[in-house]
Image (cartoon, grey):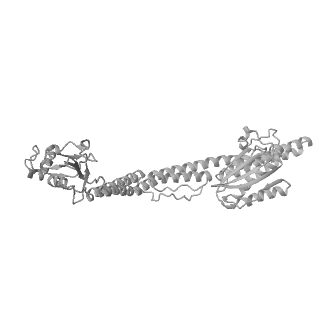
Amino acid sequence: MNNARAKLPWGTGDAASPLFLRIFLLMLVCVAVVQLLNFALLVAVQPPTPRAYTMGEIARVLKEGRDPSGQLVFTEHQQIDRSILAPRAERARPALAMALEVPPDQSDFGFERPPFPQRAPTYERNALPRAQPPRDIAAARAFIVLDAFVASYKRPDGSWVTIRPASREFELWRWFGLLWLLFTALAVVPFAWALAHRLAKPIRAFAAAAERLGRDPRASPMALSGPAEIADAAASFNKMQARLNRYVDDRTTMIGALAHDLRTPLMRLELRLERAPVALRQSCESDIRDMEAMVAATLAYVRDMSLPVGRRPLDLRSLTESVTDDLADRGAAVSLEPGDPMVIDGHSAALKTMLSNLISNAVKYAGGAQVRLGREPGEVRIEVRDEGPGIPAEDLDRVFEPLFRGERSRNRDTGGMGLGLASARAVARAHGGEIILQNRPEGGLQALVTLPV
């Protein structure tokens, strides 16, 4: 196995702090930033002090019918709607009547309900004892009120006029507070992004490592770096990869050794048959050739299962052309649709063997093959079509099993060894791809190979 290690993107050395501690500290920093910004809002933004009006000023504006300051709104021919008033004007109402010097039934006064119940923006103040109304006109005119009041006066002609401060439900300071809160939310975004990125980065790294392992079992192991949890998980992943490779190596080595060692007794048997009768010798020699062919096919299968790690960019179309041209030179009815070059990373000898197995099967069982190469997002597709009898649906996947033959006669000339498709699938999967067989609706079989780009 290659000892070089794939560098992972989480960046620090082996003695880095644990991942949970990093996330915890990042969350604390995020909360601290939010609280500091809120504290700055509390210090920097103060609600404006409501303007104070004396009852004398209110009475004068009501009688004159105009407001030089422009901060009061007049409503003609309308008395106060008491449904919108707060129940707290017991002293202010008689004070207004005294300031206007009219009977109580010719004036009215009240405070509007605050738009934000949690903070009443208006209130009344008076230097007199709270339990008593103003005792004279001077005290009534000195009575002070703040914003959000409503005052009505019945003129001598019988018409009513009502005044109230101009509406300021959402003053500038409130807009500033709203923008500050928006800025606070935006300030937290980088911390939230950093937290999400740190959580997702190890997951993406392990997903990439798993994908790399699927494409190439001999891929470089993961680097044992980063936080303790990540390093431990990477070490476990590397051990799993090593165990899988040892398991496959042990099986292929055992099969290869058995196949190789069978050659020696076969050779001795062939030598001993030289003194046997001609009829017996010819019959046994035919069986020996079958066994030697099976041994050769088994060794080829083991070789394909143990592909070298080294891969290089190659033109898949040129490789396919070399296979189809070779078969066409032998008189086979093979054709390849023209197209642009397709460059992939792969092992040229193994891919050539895979293509030769698939195309040769089509020629052998259907008399010819049409080959087509195409490109899809993230992969290339190789289609090998024929016009033969096809394969029973229940055998479409079983034909890839080693030593399984769709042709049940056990005749090597018609059924083969049953290792060609198994070897082809092993090559495709070693490159991170796959092979499937499909019966075509118009008749014949299609072998579809997908390889990652």
User: Does 380 sit left or right of 191 as displayed?
Assistant: right
Q: From the viewer's perspective, is residue 230 above or below residue 411?
A: below
Q: From the viewer's perspective, is residue 153 above or below residue 314?
A: above
User: Does 75 sit left or right of 343 as displayed?
Assistant: left
Whether residue 261 appears in this view of the structure is no
The quarter of the picture where the N terminus appears is bottom right
* Rendering coords of residue 314 (x, y %): 69, 61
* Rendering coords of residue 50 (x, y %): 22, 55
Q: Residue furthest left?
A: 135
**Residue at x-position 32% and y-position 58%:** 176
How many marks the image carries: the answer is: 0
Q: Residue furthest front?
A: 157
User: Does 108 sit left or right of 391 as displayed?
Assistant: left
Q: Nearer the viewer, residue 283 or 119?
A: 119
**Residue at x-position 81% and y-position 58%:** 326
**Residue at x-position 28% and y-position 54%:** 168
Q: Nearer the viewer, residue 44 or 431?
A: 44
The quarter of the picture where the C terminus appears is bottom right
Q: Nearer the viewer, residue 195 or 434?
A: 195
Q: Residue furthest right?
A: 278
* Rendering coords of residue 90 (x, y %): 15, 43
Whether residue 98 appears in this view of the structure is yes
* Rendering coords of residue 104 (x, y %): 14, 44
Q: Nearer the viewer, residue 55 or 269?
A: 55
